[in-house]
C-alpha cells in the first residue's frame, strides 16, 4: 500500500495514462483562442455521486449543451 501511494499502478495508473492522452488530444484541438487548457483529471473517473440523487433529463440536457458549447459546437435550442 505504501508503494502504491508513491508509484501508482493498476487502475489508478491506467486512468492517469488515459487522462494524459485525452487531455493532449483535447488541447491540440481546442478551437477558441484563450480557452482554458484541459487537465488529465478532466478525463478521469470522478467519485460516484450520492445514489439518492437521480439525474433528470433536464440536468442531462444542460450538461450535454455545456459540453457541446465547450467543444466549439452549437447546441442551439436542441431538445
Image (spheres, rainbow, N blue to C red):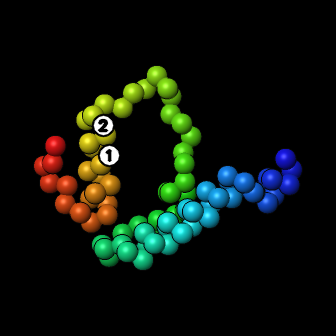
Tell me the element at label 1: helix
User: Is residue 67 placed above or below 55 in the rendered structure?
Assistant: below
User: Is residue 11 placed above or below 52 in the rendered structure?
Assistant: below
User: Going 30% across and 37% down the picture, which residue do you hit?
Assistant: 59
Tell me the element at label 2: helix
Residues at badges 1 and 2 in contact (C-beta under 8 Å)? Answer: yes
Q: Which residue is mark 1?
A: 63
User: Going 68% across and 53% down the picture, which residue do you hit?
Assistant: 12
Find residue 35 and report its horizontal and vertical position in percent. 36, 69
Find residue 49 and report its horizontal and vertical position in percent. 50, 34
Query: Residues under labels 1 and 2: Cα distance?
Result: 6 Å
User: Is residue 30 placed above or below 6 in the rendered structure?
Assistant: below
* Numbered-mark total: 2
Q: Nearer the viewer, residue 50 or 15?
A: 15
Q: Which residue is mark 2?
A: 59
User: Going 42% across and 77% down the picture, which residue do you hit?
Assistant: 28
Q: Which residue is at the far left?
A: 77
Find residue 14 and report its horizontal and vertical position in percent. 65, 58
In the image: residue 52, left or right of residue 32: right
> Counting other residues with Cα less than 10 Å from the Cα at mark 1, is it few (<14), some (14-19), or many (20 or more)?
few
User: Is residue 31 placed above or below 5 in the rendered structure?
Assistant: below
Residue 68 occupies which quadrant of the picture? bottom left
Q: Which residue is at the far right?
A: 2
User: Going 69% across and 58% down the picture, which residue do you hit?
Assistant: 13
Residue 36 occupies which quadrant of the picture? bottom left
> Counting other residues with Cα less than 10 Å from the Cα at mark 2, is it few (<14), some (14-19), or many (20 or more)?
few
Find residue 15 and report its horizontal and vertical position in percent. 61, 56
The label shown at residue 53 is none
Question: Which quadrant is the C terminus positioned in?
Answer: top left
In the image: residue 1, left or right of residue 65: right
Amino acid at each position: 500500500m505504501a508503494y502504491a501511494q508513491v508509484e501508482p499502478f493498476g487502475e489508478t495508473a491506467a486512468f492517469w495514462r488515459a487522462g494524459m492522452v485525452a487531455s493532449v488530444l483535447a488541447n491540440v484541438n481546442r478551437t477558441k483562442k484563450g480557452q482554458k487548457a484541459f487537465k488529465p483529471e478532466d478525463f478521469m473517473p470522478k467519485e460516484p455521486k450520492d445514489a439518492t440523487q437521480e439525474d433528470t433529463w433536464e440536468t442531462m440536457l444542460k450538461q450535454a449543451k455545456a459540453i457541446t458549447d465547450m467543444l466549439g459546437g452549437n447546441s442551439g435550442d436542441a431538445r
